[in-house]
Image (cartoon, grey):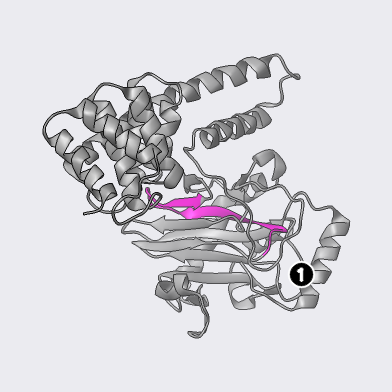
Amino acid sequence: MNAGISAFVEVDRLAAAGNLPAAAQALEQLLTSGMPVEGGGVDGPAAVAQWLKLAGLRRALRQPHRALEAVHGALILAPLDFMALVMRAGLLERIGDAQAGTAWGEALAQVPDGPMPAPLEAAVAAGRAFHADWQEKRGARLEQVAEAAEAEGAPAPSAEVAADNARRLARFRDNILRKTRVYHSEPTHFHYPGLVEREFHPRHATPWLAEVEAGFEAIRAEMLALIQSERAELEPYIQYEDRENLAQWRPLNRSRDWSAIHLLRHGAEVSRNAAQAPRTMEILSRLPQPVVPGASPNAMFSLLAPHTAIPPHVGVDNTRLVCHLPLVVPPGCWFRVGAETREWREGEAFAFDDTIEHEAMNPTDVLRVVLIFDVWHPDLASGERAAVAATIAATGREGGL
């Protein structure tokens, strides 16, 4: 046995004999001298384990600050080591350090899959509780600071704008507290720079949604009549060639679990369906829908079967928004865009950016039906709209909704 290995064995012997001060002092001298650790040199996993062993000894000796120094030695070698992050968070909590909440957030972000030893499971559960309490208290403090500053600022906006500002400030706080992650527009084909990225666009930017909602009863009646008449052209929404690399759509490809009754498709009217929904078509005709040969406008009744999920995905083009008017929605159906999840409510329309990751779920035993249509992004001026339409049309059709 070489001298280095023998020295680490001696540390274990001292610890086993209950001589923790001597074991800690000997181990600290070995690690700070750069003595190679068996099976890992001076900077491998074995060295990380020895630094954590030193932290454990210092913690047992009720020396939390020196234990933290040892944990930091481990984190220098492995910044995302779960055990090291948990020990650091627990020690900071123990000494009442203001960074304990942040440290627990960093540790909890690295929780491994699968079962953990019971003591570690208990430590993580306690850490979750501490972190949740810290988030709540810090969030309340940040809200208080923001409200005081806002009250001293510009004149009060309208109620609608004030509500939107409050939602954005709440999301800002959640991002700071790592309750939510930041999502961005990631279109698969067409990205126009400089457009506002909003998961759900506010009502003051989409005032025409009120007219869509006013037509809810007529639109819903036409949809129900279409379905019951058996004259509708109902087809699977997802239809791709098997050779295409779109694995997330495989369960829904050519499946009637997610079906569509198209009214407008890639810029053309689907006459057989549209003729049976005159009021719906009239309302759509007054909306700012993109007119892009071979691509837009688009509108359809979207039917999602019971117990069917639409997987996370992004859309084609950020120059448009996609709008939903829920028509038949059993309680519990939900729709997520980025970090915001909403339940559809019959008759309550919204506009969202489909180039931000989104997904949907119908967990109920009843069919869910939504009118879906596209509109121009409100940031685009009329000249830009014409230029965008001509450019996209020149590339050839790259898909619809």
Percent across and percent down for residue 97 are 42, 21
Which residue does the numbered mark 1 point to in the structure image? Answer: 292
Which residue is drawn at the image coordinates 59% and 55% (left, top)?
356
> In the rendered structure, which segment of residues is drawn in magenta?
317-336
Percent across and percent down for residue 336 are 49, 51
Residue 144 among magenta residues: no
* Amino acid at dot 1: Val
Percent across and percent down for residue 98 are 45, 21
Q: Does residue 111 appear anywhere in the picture?
A: no
- For the N terminus, the quadrant is bottom left
Using the image, determine if residue 284 lies above or below residue 295.
above
- For the C terminus, the quadrant is bottom right
Using the image, determine if residue 351 lies above or below residue 314.
above
Residue 329 among magenta residues: yes
Element carrying mark 1: loop
Q: Is residue 228 left or right of residue 202?
A: left
Q: Is residue 194 left or right of residue 178?
A: right
Report the front residue among 230 and 139: 139
Q: Is residue 248 left or right of residue 63?
A: right
Report the front residue among 89 and 249: 89
Report the front residue among 371 and 246: 246
When asked about the image quadrant of residue 265, the answer is bottom right
Using the image, determine if residue 189 lies above or below residue 38.
below
Percent across and percent down for residue 308 are 37, 63
Using the image, determine if residue 366 lies above or below residue 116.
below
Report the front residue among 46 and 324: 46
Q: Does residue 145 appear anywhere in the picture?
A: yes
Which residue is drawn at the image coordinates 56% and 51% (left, top)?
216
How crowded pointer 1 is (Cα within 10 Å; few <14, some 14-19, many 20+) is rated as many
Tell me the chief SS of the magenta region: strand
